[in-house]
Image (cartoon, rainbow, N blue to C red):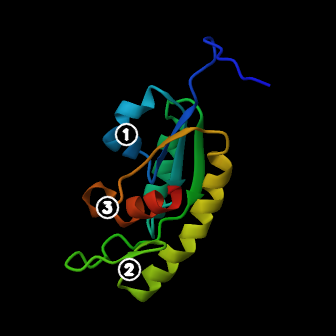
Amino acid sequence: MTASCDSTQREPASVVVVAHPDDEALWLSSALAAATRIVYCFGDLFERPRDSQARRAALAAVPLPGTVELAVPESGAGVYADWTRPQPTAFGIHITEPDARKRYEANYPRIVAGLREALAGFHDVYTHNPWGEYGHTEHIQVHRAVT
């Protein structure tokens, strides 16, 4: 049996995966036009319920097609990486504060599980770079989960 090339076949679908709402515009705007799905990994902000409510409302108003919200709560680990000696880990980057590290590490399998479903059937995936653009611990974690 031989395969034939169909010139009318569509390009493989692409997806943008970001940690937070607004990351798609800040870091991956050039990939949005081709994306048929945008995945937002984090939902509620750590210990900021009023801001979390505003984030949910803003995300509901996003005029982009195929949005998926994994709604993993933020870990609060953002300021707890030692940037004088960064240590990559299986979960992203080493978090120095024990409670924040526990939340951060607990988020990783939730993100991976959500991405397995959200990315099924997609050929190209665009996401954060390995060092989270400017060192954002949750961007690093999302990159690790995607890879």
Q: Nearer the viewer, residue 49 or 90?
A: 90
Task: Give SS at disc 3.
Answer: loop
User: Three-letter amino acid code at disc 1?
Assistant: Leu
Q: Nearer the viewer, residue 62 or 41?
A: 41
**Quarter occupied by residue 33:** top left
The quarter of the rendered structure image containing the N terminus is: top right
Q: Residue at 65%, 14% (x, y): give it.
A: 6
Looking at this view, name the residue that lies furthest to the left: 84
Looking at the picture, does residue 92 appear above or below residue 134? below
Q: Which mark is residue 95?
A: 2
Q: Residue at 47%, 59% (x, y): give it.
A: 142
- The residues bearing labels 3 and 1 have C-alpha atoms spaced at a distance of 15 Å
- Residue under label 1, please give it: 28
Position of 130 with respect to 19 (left or right) is left
Q: Where residue 67 sits in the image (x, y, percent)?
A: 57, 38
Looking at this view, name the residue that lies furthest to the top: 8
Q: Residue at 60%, 43% (x, y): give it.
A: 68
* Disc with the residue nearer the chain's start (2 vs 3): 2
User: Three-letter amino acid code at disc 3?
Assistant: Trp
Say whether residue 56 is visible.
Answer: yes
- Residue under label 3, please give it: 131
Looking at this view, name the residue that lies furthest to the front: 1
Position of 88 with respect to 18 (left or right) is left
* Disc with the residue nearer the chain's start (2 vs 1): 1
Q: Where residue 38 sits in the image (x, y, percent)?
A: 52, 39
- The residues bearing labels 2 and 1 have C-alpha atoms spaced at a distance of 26 Å
Looking at the picture, does residue 140 appear above or below residue 76? above
